Image: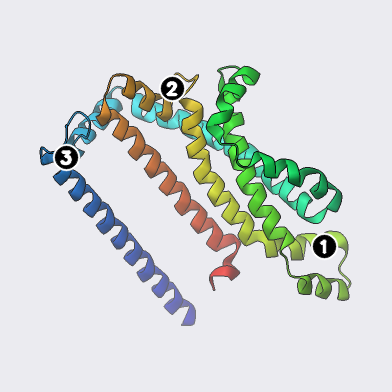
Amino acid sequence: MTISLAQSDLAQSGLAQVGRTLLSIGGVVAVWWLIAASGLVNPDLFPTPDAVWLAAMDLYQEGILLSDMGTSLTRAAIGFLIGAIGGVLVGLLTARTRVIGFALNPLLTLLRPIPAIALVPLAIVWFGIGEGSKYFVIAYTVFLAVWLNTHHGTSSVANTYIRASRSLGASTPREFFEVVVPAAAPHIVAGLRMGAALAFLSLVAAELSGASSGIGFRIQEARQFIQTDRMFVGLIELGLLGAALDLFFVSLSRRLVHWEHL
């Protein structure tokens, strides 16, 4: 009975969230349409929602919309996986191994303020204008975000948990996998969620130079011809993909670190 009530409350909360989201989006679209149709702004620079919709339909019929989406998603996914795996592993090591932390923490702290777009020229020199340079830029950005959250979460595990596990005779590997990792899991998942968002930001930076396809490239191409309706399509496409990915990580968080949501 208790489980049924909890599920009912969760379903009602989900419906309320969907309702608020739709209401918010509807309000934004209404304000957008009023401003664009008022005649106060140049429609060539600030198109109406229906003009953007027609541009999206044109791109879809040309086969460009889905093709660019698939290309960009592939790049973002591969770069994210490389950066996320590296970030989690290095974060665990720098937090729990003093020598590795002493050697790598200063370097990684210096790299963090360098934006992804600043690395695009270097990535092209190193890897050429192919896919390798794009994977590098995306993985770099994701790696630093995931590393920082993983390192912070792992190094912040309460000593009470460590002492309790050792008093119960837990071995070092068991202590690490059954105490440290679960305690740091909320921070790790938060880092993965942040890394997923940053993957799309760095994706656009990577595609603005040295690309012939993808959402970022299409935005750049539309800028050259002052096709703001197509630019809006690309921006909305990025927003929808990012929102869908964020919802995925919220759901994943509820499953993997369910004790944080009790």
Secondary structure under the numbered disc 1 in the rendered image: helix
- Image x and y of residue 225, in percent: 28, 19
* Residue at the spot 60% in from the left edge and 17% down from the top edge: 128
In this view of the protein, which residue sits in the foreground, 246 or 114?
Answer: 114
- Residue occupied by mark 2: 213
Asked which quadrant contains residue 37, the reply is top left
Query: For the residues carrying marks 2 and 3, which lies nearer the camera in this image?
Result: 3
Query: Residue type at mark 2?
Result: Ser
For residue 79, side relative to residue 107 (left or right): left
Is residue 202 found left or right of 128 in the rendered image?
Answer: left
Q: Quadrant of the C terminus?
A: bottom right
Label 1 sits on what residue type?
Arg
Q: Judge left or right: residue 177 versus residue 72.
A: right
Q: Is residue 232 visible?
A: yes
Upstream in sequence: badge 2 or badge 1: 1
C-alpha gap between disc 1 and disc 3: 61 Å
| Residue matched to label 3 | 36
Query: What's under tag 3, amino acid-wise?
Result: Ala
Question: Mark 1: few, some, or many residues within 10 Å (few <14, many ≥20)?
Answer: few
The residue located at (48%, 52%) in the rendering is 248
Residue 195 sits in quarter: top right
Mark 2 to mark 3: distance in Å? 29 Å
Q: Tell me the number on the disc at residue 174.
A: 1
